[in-house]
């Protein structure tokens, strides 16, 4: 039984290149409204979302970049007008990918599923396309806030839409997330690593992974995992960004060392 759940999640990941890649029952939007939104491409194909967090920096999910036998040079981040098919989209190659050193993958599934599912993308050059805009990192997440998720993940018809989709969900309390997830043979929510949002009708799906969850205009979450089949009655789970601000800034804004 336990194996079934893991395989379902993994096959979801293998099919799409990530765990959560669609927005279910969202609304069409664009990158003017979400200027930090990137599409992470592998060999020119959308695999995940990502967010601009600095002039040459983006953040995504570790599982988006850690699939088997990947070739780092084949990744790029695309800036578009909201449509993946935008003829004017610009693809920026990646200089260095830094997945979190303590990303657990499938280990520790029942204590904290996919803990530290975050990766930094350092670009060779500054993103200069019209839509570029770094989003500020959130340092605190308040329960019951309505927050926004965006992505090109599968929609309710199992199709990856061309047009960026958005939806909102409400931040659940720690006990709310735990009660929905930490039941027998389910992947475990852990408040140290995760934040979860609930909406009975909408949510993330395969292909949304790595993309942003935004609360009050700040990046509060990185889309990570959820129910196989993208059952919206289970809250989708995001990396708890406030707990990674120090880790991120250690790379993007390193403290000078006096010699
Ligand atoms: C990675 O891809 C680049 C570009 O296609 C290629 O030159 C390189 O040999 C590849 N590396 C490996 C280890 O396959
Ligand atoms: C959050 O969204 C829920 C569901 O749509 C709504 O009932 C509630 O009023 C919203 N809360 C705020 C503070 O906007």
Image (cartoon, rainbow, N blue to C red):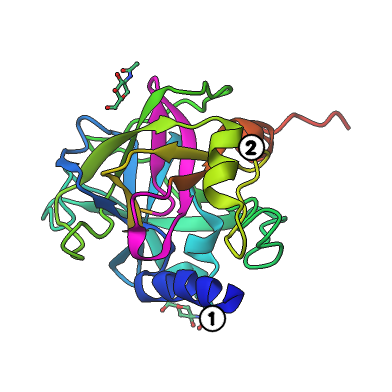
> Is 197 above or below relative to 227?
above
Between residues 118 and 2, which one lies in front from this camera angle? 2
Q: Residue at x 63, y 65 (%)?
A: 105
The location of residue 15, given as percent across then percent down, is: 36, 75
> Is 42 above or below relative to 209?
below
Quadrant, the N terminus: bottom right
Q: Mark 2 vs mark 1: give the one in front.
A: 2
**Seen in the image, is 15 located left or right of residue 154?**
right
> Is 164 above or below relative to 4?
above
Q: Which mark is residue 244?
A: 2
Residue 186: in magenta span: no
Q: Is mark 1 within 8 Å of ligand 1?
A: no
In 3D space, how far apart are the residues under numbered discs 2 and 1 (Cα atoms)? 27 Å
Quadrant, the C terminus: top right
For disc 2, the neighbor class at 10 Å (few under 14, some 14 to 19, many from 20) is some
Of labels 2 and 1, earlier in sequence is 1
């Amino acid at each position: 039984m336990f194996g079934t759940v893991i395989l379902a999640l993994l096959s979801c990941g293998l099919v799409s290149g990530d765990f959560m890649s669609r927005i279910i029952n969202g609304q069409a939007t664009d990158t003017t409204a979400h200027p930090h939104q990137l599409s992470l491409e592998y060999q020119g194909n959308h695999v995940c979302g990502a967010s601009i967090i600095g002039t040459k920096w983006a953040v995504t999910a570790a599982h988006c970049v850690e699939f088997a036998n990947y070739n780092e040079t084949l990744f790029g981040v695309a800036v578009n007008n909201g449509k993946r098919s935008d003829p004017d989209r610009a693809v920026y190659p990646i200089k260095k990918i830094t997945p979190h050193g303590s990303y657990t993958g499938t280990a520790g599934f029942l204590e904290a599923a996919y803990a530290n599912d975050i990766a930094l993308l350092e670009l060779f050059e500054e993103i200069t396309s019209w839509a570029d805009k770094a989003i500020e990192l959130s340092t605190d997440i308040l329960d019951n806030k309505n927050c926004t998720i965006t992505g090109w993940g599968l929609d309710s018809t199992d199709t990856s839409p061309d047009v960026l989709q958005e939806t909102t969900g409400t931040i659940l309390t720690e006990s709310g997330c735990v009660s929905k997830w930490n039941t027998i043979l389910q992947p475990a929510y852990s408040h140290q690593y995760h934040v979860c949002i609930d909406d009975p009708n909408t949510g993330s799906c395969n292909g949304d992974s790595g993309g942003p969850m935004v609360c009050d205009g700040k990046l509060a979450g990185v889309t990570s995992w959820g129910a196989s089949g993208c059952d919206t009655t289970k809250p989708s789970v995001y990396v708890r960004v406030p707990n990674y601000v120090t880790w991120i800034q250690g790379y993007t804004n390193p403290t000078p060392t006096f010699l």
